[in-house]
């Protein structure tokens, strides 16, 4: 699957695009923020495209699992295989049972030859193992354990490329119930496990088989007895250490135990053995005997198996159009990065100029006029038009910055009213010092200024007509600075929210004819800027 077809990866690209666009909306507070955002977007997009290219160049692996009918061959293993099953096999050791082929494998070499021939001539056929155990096959459990150990030692040299799925079966008389159509058949605890059934040990397999018998107990009294005898068999295996021998046997890497079957078989054995002796000693009863020896019946292996088919498909090579898309995207991203960087540089320079002007106003030095003229000239260099053809409003921060500069240079053009909303008057002649009355007036004004946290204000200082024009301009500016400094020192208001102007003797509110009238003109006015 193509990388770009995954919804998560597409969401990642859109998220990075949003971050890059948002970086251009923060008014260029740092010169590298927008550029870094676009660089991150470009790097992520190139990584995505590169990964997509590598994924397209790899083969596509498809796995399809489905049920199929497969033939199987079963190999009869164990120390009692030849004793109990050879009579039913042909001369070449093959038995056909309900369409299934059964082979007797009494040695590791024989089993290896059969498996190699089967793989070479019929690779579609599934090999299975079948390990039968006759509880009365020997007179004592010690002899039975000895046979298991000998068989294990004989097969220790077995080395198969793949483990052989093997089913363990216990044959014994459990009930007198027999199938009506085939009295010689056995009644099995469950079906023959498939080759792909998961691996288990003897304890787990017995528990599963007894669970299958327990599920049938409601059918008739034979099923109840069959379950009880199965539980007794498990106790016999555990007490006589045969279960431990079987556990050790099935740890061989060439055998994989995939299930345990219990067979309710016949009317009994022709003699009493290890199982009968244990029943007599433990339960005070002896199983019945049969008059003649019959070949134990065999279960029917399954024919339906789940198989997985794996296919490798080589995807088409990357087209020229795909490569051209990568080049075009890279070029567009680099161009946007360059534009963002230029805008950020211009914006940062303007902000530095405005900051210097604010500092000069606060210090009331003689550079205010020079700095204002420099800011006026620098503003003409800012041009937001190059990004307009893209139709993106994300660069509106440039327009906002130009507005802030214009307000700083020509605040009178942005006042919301021709009349001031507050006046602090009656300054002493030739003085910018604040009296106690001035401070009380400013304290009353503070809540109004703090109420609108985003507003900017114009503070204009005035003087009377005594003294020269330059002296009056400087004095009026000092009065505006004194008022602004007091507000900043006694509140959380920032200096940048105030624009200061010294108007000198302009806009008098009195005719300056006497001392009282001149005092009215020595004032400071407040305006709200749009």
Image (tube, grey):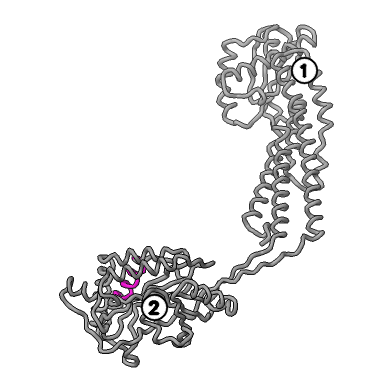
Q: Nearer the viewer, residue 110 or 490?
A: 110
Q: Is residue 412 visible?
A: no
Q: Which mark is residue 81?
A: 2
Instruction: State the residue lying farthest toward the bottom.
Output: 181
Magenta span dominant secondary structure: helix
Residue sitting at x 73%, y 31% = 404
Is-magenta flag for residue 206?
yes
Please rate how many residues cluster around mark 1, counting C-alpha atoms within 10 Å: few if below 14, some from 14 to 19, many from 20.
Answer: some
Q: Position of residue 71 (x, y in %)?
A: 52, 81
Q: Is residue 314 above or below residue 93?
A: above
**Is residue 1 found left or right of 119 in the rendered image?**
right
Q: Quadrant of residue 470?
A: top right
Instruction: State the residue lying farthest toward the left.
Output: 284
Residue sitting at x 64%, y 20% = 423
Q: First in sequence, mark 2 or 1: give its number.
A: 2
Question: In this picture, which residue range is highlighted in magenta?
Answer: 203-214
Q: Position of residue 219 (x, y in %)?
A: 27, 82
Q: Which residue is mark 1?
A: 368
Is-magenta flag for residue 89?
no
Residue sitting at x 68%, y 16% = 481
Q: Which mark is residue 84?
A: none
Q: Is residue 99 above or below residue 207?
A: below
Q: Nearer the viewer, residue 443 or 236?
A: 236
Q: Is residue 428 visible?
A: yes
Q: Nearer the viewer, residue 360 or 351?
A: 351
Quadrant location of the C terminus? top right
Q: Quadrant of residue 34?
A: top right
Indicate the secondary structure of the residue bearing disc 2: helix
Please rate how many residues cluster around mark 2, counting C-alpha atoms within 10 Å: few if below 14, some from 14 to 19, many from 20.
Answer: some
């Amino acid at each position: 699957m193509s990388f770009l077809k995954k919804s998560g990866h597409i969401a990642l690209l859109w998220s990075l695009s949003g971050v890059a666009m948002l970086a251009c909306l923060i008014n260029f507070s740092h010169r590298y923020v927008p550029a870094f955002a676009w660089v991150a977007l470009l790097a992520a997009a190139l990584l995505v495209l590169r990964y997509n290219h590598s994924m397209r160049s790899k083969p596509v692996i498809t796995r399809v699992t489905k049920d199929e009918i497969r033939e199987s061959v079963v190999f009869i293993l164990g120390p009692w295989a030849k004793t109990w099953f050879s009579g039913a096999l042909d001369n070449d050791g093959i038995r056909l049972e309900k369409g299934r082929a059964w082979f007797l494998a009494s040695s590791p070499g024989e089993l290896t030859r059969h498996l190699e021939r089967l793989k070479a001539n019929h690779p579609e056929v599934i090999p299975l193992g079948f390990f039968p155990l006759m509880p009365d096959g020997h007179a004592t459990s010690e002899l039975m354990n000895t046979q298991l150990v000998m068989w294990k030692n004989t097969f220790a040299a077995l080395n198969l490329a793949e483990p052989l799925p093997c089913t363990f079966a216990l044959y014994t008389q459990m009930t007198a119930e027999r199938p009506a159509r085939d009295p010689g058949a056995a009644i099995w605890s469950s079906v023959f496990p498939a080759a792909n059934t998961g691996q288990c040990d003897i304890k787990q397999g017995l528990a599963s088989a007894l669970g299958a018998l327990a599920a049938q107990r409601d059918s008739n009294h034979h099923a109840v007895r069959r379950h009880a005898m199965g539980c007794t068999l498990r106790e016999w295996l555990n007490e006589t250490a045969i279960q431990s021998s079987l556990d050790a046997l099935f740890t061989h890497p060439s055998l994989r135990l995939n299930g345990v079957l219990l067979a309710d078989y016949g009317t009994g054995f022709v003699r009493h053995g290890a199982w009968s002796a244990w029943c007599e000693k433990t339960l005070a009863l002896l199983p019945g005997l049969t008059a003649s020896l019959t070949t134990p019946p065999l279960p029917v292996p399954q024919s339906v198996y789940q198989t997985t088919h794996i296919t490798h498909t080589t995807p088409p090579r990357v087209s020229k159009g795909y490569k051209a898309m990568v080049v075009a995207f890279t070029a567009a991203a680099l161009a946007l990065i360059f534009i963002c960087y230029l805008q950020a540089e211009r914006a940062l320079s303007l902000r530095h100029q405005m900051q210097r002007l604010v500092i000069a106003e606060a210090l009331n030095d003689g550079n205010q006029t020079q700095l204002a003229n420099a800011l006026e000239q620098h503003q003409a260099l800012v041009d937001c038009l190059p990004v307009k053809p893209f139709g993106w409003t994300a660069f509106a921060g440039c327009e906002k910055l130009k507005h802030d500069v214009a307000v700083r240079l020509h605040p009178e053009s942005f006042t919301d009213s021709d009349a001031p909303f507050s006046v602090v008057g009656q300054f002493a002649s030739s003085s910018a010092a604040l009296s106690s009355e001035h401070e009380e007036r400013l304290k009353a004004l503070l809540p109004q200024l703090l109420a609108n946290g985003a507003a900017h204000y114009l503070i204009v200082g005035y003087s009377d007509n005594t003294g020269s024009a330059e002296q009056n301009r400087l004095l009026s500016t000092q009065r505006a600075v004194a008022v602004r400094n007091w507000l900043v020192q006694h509140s959380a208001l920032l200096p940048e929210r105030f624009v200061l102007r010294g108007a000198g003797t302009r806009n008098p509110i009195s005719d300056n004819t006497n001392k009282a009238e001149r005092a009215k003109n020595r004032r400071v006015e407040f305006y709200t800027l749009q």
